[in-house]
Image (tube, rainbow, N blue to C red):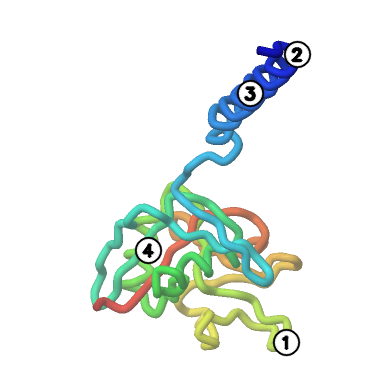
Amino acid sequence: MNWQQVVPGIVLLLVKLTGTSLFFVFFPQIFPKGNITSTSTENSSARTPLKQQRWERFREHDYLFSEEKAKWLISQADCEQWKSKLVIINDTKELEFVINKTAMANYFIGLIYSESTKKWEWTNHKEHKMNLFPIKATMDKECAAIRAGVVSPVSCYDEYNWICEKTYS
């Protein structure tokens, strides 16, 4: 047997085995498994939750109060993946229900400020009625969040929890 030809082969085999072992050891640390997977869309990163979410029923609607935080557009995309929309608050009873669930954190709702009309509008394009709750326009804060009964203008680029709403089915 010619050891001058065999030794480089054994060394090469050991290097490959070491590299493969390191790959399998460090791969999970580089690409961890989490509660979400990401897929790329045109303007943002849409996330698909892997675990079943807990919906709460109130009247004819189901509500999801997120446990994670994200920007407004990602929050909206997350709701759409659950075949729902960011919450649209229609009356005082629905407002009371939402207030009782949002005491500890800010939650995005489906209310945005329209520069073209200079008014707050819901994502279904209906104008917000100020007698339900007041909200003022603020420069660079075109989205809205609710916390403990107070609806405030916030930056759409800040990260908050969010509330999804869908019709009971």
Q: CA distance from mark 4 to mark 3?
A: 63 Å
Q: Is disc 3 placed on a helix, strand or loop?
A: helix
Q: Which mark is residue 4?
A: 2
Residue that protrudes farthest toward the front in the picture? 1
Of 17 and 7, nearer the camera is 7
Q: Is disc 1 placed on a helix, strand or loop?
A: loop
Q: CA distance from mark 2 to mark 1?
A: 79 Å
Nearer to us: label 1 or label 3: 3
Residue under the image location 70 percent in, 13 percent down: 2
Evaluate if marks 2 and 4 touch, with contact meaning CB atoms under 8 Å apart.
Answer: no
For label 1, the residue is: 116
- x and y, in percent, of residue 6 in the image: 68, 17
Q: CA distance from mark 1 to mark 3?
A: 67 Å
Evaluate if marks 1 and 4 touch, with contact meaning CB atoms under 8 Å apart.
Answer: no
Residue under the image location 58 percent in, 71 percent down: 135
Q: CA distance from mark 3 to mark 2?
A: 15 Å
Q: Is disc 4 placed on a helix, strand or loop?
A: helix
Closer to the chain start, of discs 1 and 3, is: 3
Nearer to us: label 4 or label 3: 3
Closer to the chain start, of discs 4 and 3, is: 3
- x and y, in percent, of residue 108 in the image: 52, 63
For label 3, the residue is: 13
**Residue 164 vertical position relative to residue 160 in the rendered view, above or below:** below
Going by the numbered disc 3, the residue's amino acid type is Leu
Going by the numbered disc 4, the residue's amino acid type is Val
